Image: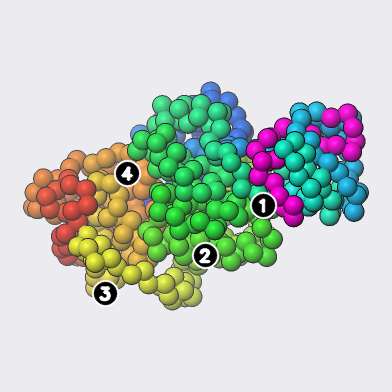
Amino acid sequence: MLRNRRAKIVATLGPASSEPEMIEKLFRAGVDVFRLNFSHGSHEDHRRRYDAIRRLEEQARHPIAILQDLQGPKIRLGTLPDGRIRLETGSRIRFVLDRTSSDPTRLPLPHPEVFEGMLPGHKLLIDDGKVRLVAHGCGHDFIDAEVVTGGVVSDRKGVNLPDTLLQLSPITDKDREDLAFGLELGVDWVAFSFVQRPSDLMEAHQLIGGRAGVMAKIEKPRALGEIEDILRLADAIMVARGDLGVEIPPEEVPGAQKDLVRLCRLAGKPVIIATQMLESMIQAPAPTRAEASDVATAIYDGADAVMLSAESASGQYPLEAVATMDRIVAHTERHKSYPPIIEALHPSVEPLAQHAVSAAAAEVAKTIGAAGVVAFTSSGTTAARIARQRTGVPILAITPNLNTARRLALLWGAYNVRSDDVTSYSQMVEEAVAQVRAHNFAQAGQSVVVVAGVPFGAAGSTNNLRVVTV
């Protein structure tokens, strides 16, 4: 399944895309990574989708990545008088530590950690920011607040707290149950919601134990303040613009997106741009011009992947959404403005042999006009180092590890292949040529740059570069 683009497409499965026939159509149309959203659906629902993807993988003879997205902690109001209440702009209201309230001047908020972290001046945003308040008095079981933007709120509406550091783990009891289930299934990536600090990811790594890649969803202002330390611990980043766009002003989201993509590129970590990319295609067969520009902007920035959420999970046109995104990405990468923009950022090469050889392979391939780079890799790191250079040369990542092959489906420019391990230099060349031919990666007479490590099979040993003519 060679694509005509370098950036990848992540699609969320849901009621509109759960049947095996539809999952196959989405894959053929361009999906590289399937997302299972554990905020919705039962374990049995997700098991059926997982099994359908693995059957498709076997049929297509190509590794497919599965991303488990955990719900994370949700701060919600309790039960209100008559189920709803109108808050008038300029009025005062008291939040109380309770699950229900019969007093219209008191809003129940059954989350003690909110009261522990709240300070005067902190904002409280209800229902995705439609109703906005500011705290002016706080206690261990109450928050007095002024309504800045009024409106109607109802039972169980979500509450965002952009200024408040919550002393709670982003991994809830539900997440732990869901994670155990996902790891039992064999998911390839796990996305953790509402990451605020590096210690959140330390807990995530302890729970996963190397069985899947750890992805941090960036949707809290606090995370932006500690992003470099978070990035060091994460295997990948998702820019979750939905909640992030509620907690920071919308005019700051584009700049934050660019900063995050740049940092991920410099670190050699995959980054996904997510939320509302083709939102109108939930109900329409074509996107708005603004949405097409939004997807293209993420590609010009150098993102590894762009993601569909409700568009493919519950929308009326899931297949059209994937095909549209595929066309936008491919066309953007072919545009004359793309190479100079994408190559303007030059990641520095660390003074280590494996980094230098990987970077050199990308540069040699570009200079001689090679059909691509063939990277033998056990952990996927060699392929990531080559992709980090964004030279536009495709990467054929060959690994004996099926889990690595699947995770590499998220990496920019990488075509992931599982193959038996090589044990000698001559076997390396033979296997490279055989895989190149088998996957139509190059034509007879074309050159490829082959990168590997000697001794073979040892992670982090990348030290060999060779130009081979097919």
- Disc 4 marks a residue whose amino acid type is Ala
Contact, CB < 8 Å: mark 3 with mark 2?
Answer: no
- Disc 1 marks a residue whose amino acid type is Pro
Task: Confirm whether the magenta stretch covers residue 110.
Answer: yes
What crowding class fits label 4: few (fewer than 14 Cα within 10 Å), some (14-19), or many (20 or more)?
Answer: many
Which numbered tag is attached to residue 259? 2
Say which label, 4 or 1, has the lower sequence index: 1
Q: Residue 235, can we see it?
A: yes
Contact, CB < 8 Å: mark 1 with mark 2?
Answer: no
Q: Which residue is mark 4?
A: 405
Say which label, 1 or 2, has the lower sequence index: 1
What crowding class fits label 1: few (fewer than 14 Cα within 10 Å), some (14-19), or many (20 or more)?
Answer: some
Q: Pick the residue in front: 303 or 143.
A: 143
On screen, residue 399 above or below 50: below
Structural distance between the alpha carbons of marks 1 and 2: 19 Å
The residue sitting at 17% across, 45% down in the picture is: 457
Secondary structure category for the residue under label 2: helix
Q: Which residue is mark 1?
A: 162
Horizontal arrangement in the rendering, residue 336 relative to residue 397 (left or right): right
Between tags 1 and 2, which lies in front? 1
Q: Pick the residue in front: 429 or 142.
A: 142
The magenta span reads: 101-123
- Disc 2 marks a residue whose amino acid type is Asp
Say which label, 3 or 2, has the lower sequence index: 2
Q: Which residue is mark 3?
A: 367
